[in-house]
Amino acid sequence: MMRTTLLSWALTLSALTYAAAACRPPAAGAPPANAGQDSSERGKDPFASIPRVTVAELAEALKEGRAVALDVRPAEAFEEGHIAGAVSIPEEEVAARAGELPKDKLVVAYCA
Protein backbone atom coordinates (compact mmCIF):
# COMPACT_ATOMS: atom_id res chain seq x y z
CA MET A 1 0.00 0.00 0.00
CA MET A 2 2.75 2.45 0.96
CA ARG A 3 4.70 1.65 -2.19
CA THR A 4 1.60 2.19 -4.35
CA THR A 5 0.93 5.55 -2.67
CA LEU A 6 4.53 6.67 -3.17
CA LEU A 7 4.46 5.60 -6.81
CA SER A 8 1.17 7.45 -7.31
CA TRP A 9 2.65 10.62 -5.79
CA ALA A 10 5.79 10.30 -7.89
CA LEU A 11 3.74 10.00 -11.08
CA THR A 12 1.51 12.91 -10.07
CA LEU A 13 4.48 15.12 -9.28
CA SER A 14 6.14 14.19 -12.58
CA ALA A 15 2.97 15.05 -14.51
CA LEU A 16 2.63 18.36 -12.68
CA THR A 17 6.26 19.21 -13.34
CA TYR A 18 5.85 18.52 -17.06
CA ALA A 19 2.58 20.46 -17.17
CA ALA A 20 4.20 23.41 -15.45
CA ALA A 21 7.15 23.28 -17.85
CA ALA A 22 4.73 23.35 -20.77
CA CYS A 23 3.28 26.59 -19.40
CA ARG A 24 6.60 28.38 -19.08
CA PRO A 25 7.21 30.79 -21.96
CA PRO A 26 10.48 30.32 -23.85
CA ALA A 27 13.38 32.52 -22.82
CA ALA A 28 14.01 35.56 -24.98
CA GLY A 29 16.31 34.62 -27.85
CA ALA A 30 15.96 30.88 -27.13
CA PRO A 31 15.82 28.60 -30.16
CA PRO A 32 12.47 26.98 -30.95
CA ALA A 33 11.69 23.88 -28.89
CA ASN A 34 12.01 21.71 -31.99
CA ALA A 35 15.33 23.18 -33.16
CA GLY A 36 17.76 20.48 -34.19
CA GLN A 37 15.03 17.94 -34.91
CA ASP A 38 14.43 16.61 -38.36
CA SER A 39 10.95 16.98 -39.82
CA SER A 40 9.92 13.43 -38.79
CA GLU A 41 10.42 14.32 -35.10
CA ARG A 42 8.78 17.77 -35.10
CA GLY A 43 5.22 16.47 -35.07
CA LYS A 44 5.70 14.50 -31.85
CA ASP A 45 4.15 15.97 -28.70
CA PRO A 46 6.68 15.81 -25.83
CA PHE A 47 3.77 15.93 -23.37
CA ALA A 48 1.68 13.23 -25.05
CA SER A 49 1.96 10.90 -22.05
CA ILE A 50 0.38 13.45 -19.70
CA PRO A 51 -3.38 12.87 -19.34
CA ARG A 52 -5.51 15.79 -20.44
CA VAL A 53 -9.09 16.71 -19.59
CA THR A 54 -11.51 18.95 -21.43
CA VAL A 55 -12.97 22.06 -19.86
CA ALA A 56 -16.33 20.27 -19.57
CA GLU A 57 -14.73 17.23 -17.90
CA LEU A 58 -12.90 19.46 -15.43
CA ALA A 59 -16.03 21.48 -14.66
CA GLU A 60 -17.97 18.28 -13.94
CA ALA A 61 -15.19 16.82 -11.78
CA LEU A 62 -14.89 20.08 -9.81
CA LYS A 63 -18.67 20.27 -9.32
CA GLU A 64 -18.74 16.66 -8.06
CA GLY A 65 -15.74 17.25 -5.77
CA ARG A 66 -13.59 14.67 -7.60
CA ALA A 67 -10.90 17.14 -8.70
CA VAL A 68 -8.96 20.23 -7.74
CA ALA A 69 -7.71 22.84 -10.21
CA LEU A 70 -4.07 23.77 -9.66
CA ASP A 71 -3.08 27.17 -11.01
CA VAL A 72 0.70 27.12 -11.60
CA ARG A 73 0.99 30.72 -12.79
CA PRO A 74 2.72 33.40 -10.70
CA ALA A 75 0.69 34.60 -7.70
CA GLU A 76 0.05 37.97 -9.38
CA ALA A 77 -1.65 36.29 -12.35
CA PHE A 78 -3.73 34.14 -9.98
CA GLU A 79 -4.90 37.26 -8.16
CA GLU A 80 -6.02 38.81 -11.44
CA GLY A 81 -8.33 35.90 -12.13
CA HIS A 82 -8.56 32.12 -11.81
CA ILE A 83 -10.89 29.14 -11.91
CA ALA A 84 -13.29 29.30 -8.96
CA GLY A 85 -11.91 27.23 -6.10
CA ALA A 86 -8.49 26.78 -7.71
CA VAL A 87 -5.37 26.32 -5.60
CA SER A 88 -2.42 28.59 -6.40
CA ILE A 89 1.03 27.03 -6.34
CA PRO A 90 3.44 28.76 -8.75
CA GLU A 91 5.23 26.23 -10.96
CA GLU A 92 8.61 26.76 -9.32
CA GLU A 93 7.06 25.79 -5.95
CA VAL A 94 5.12 22.69 -7.03
CA ALA A 95 7.78 20.15 -6.04
CA ALA A 96 8.27 21.67 -2.59
CA ARG A 97 4.54 22.09 -1.91
CA ALA A 98 3.14 18.91 -3.46
CA GLY A 99 2.14 17.70 0.02
CA GLU A 100 -0.51 20.44 0.12
CA LEU A 101 -2.42 18.77 -2.72
CA PRO A 102 -5.17 16.27 -1.96
CA LYS A 103 -4.23 12.63 -2.37
CA ASP A 104 -7.77 11.48 -3.04
CA LYS A 105 -8.66 13.81 -5.95
CA LEU A 106 -7.63 14.36 -9.52
CA VAL A 107 -5.23 17.33 -9.62
CA VAL A 108 -5.48 19.29 -12.87
CA ALA A 109 -2.71 21.82 -13.40
CA TYR A 110 -3.34 24.80 -15.65
CA CYS A 111 -1.51 27.96 -16.65
CA ALA A 112 -3.89 29.91 -18.84
Image (cartoon, rainbow, N blue to C red):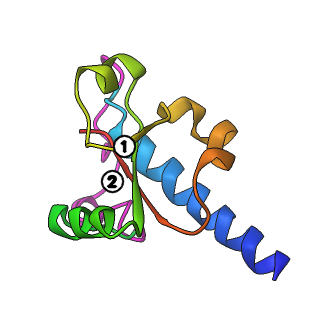
Q: Residue 35 shows which numbered tag?
A: none
In the image, what residue occupies the spot 68% across and 48% down?
99
Depth check: 16 or 83 in front? 83
Which quadrant holds the C terminus? top left
Q: Decide: few, some or many residues near mark 2? Use Cα within 10 Å; few <14, some 14-19, many ≥20.
A: few
**Mark closer to the observer (1, 2):** 1
Asked if the stretch drawn in magenta spans residue 33, the answer is yes
Q: Is residue 69 above or below residue 112?
A: below
Q: Is residue 53 above or below residue 85?
A: below
Amino acid type, residue under disc 1 in the picture:
Ala
Which quadrant holds the N terminus? bottom right
The residue that disc 1 covers is: 86
Image position, residue 102 (x, y; %): 58, 57
Image position, residue 94 (x, y; %): 57, 40
Asked if the stretch drawn in magenta spans residue 13, the answer is no
Q: Which residues are magenta?
A: 27-50
Left or right of residue 14, residue 59 in this image:
left
Residue positioned most to the bottom: 1
Q: Is residue 64 above or below residue 39?
A: below
Q: Secondary structure at mark 1?
A: loop
Residue positioned most to the right: 2
In the image, what residue occupies the spot 40% across and 63% down?
67
In the image, what residue occupies the spot 60% across and 55% down?
13
Amino acid type, residue under disc 2 in the picture:
Gln
In the image, what residue occupies the spot 75% across and 80% down?
4
The residue that disc 2 covers is: 37
**Quadrant location of residue 22?**
top left
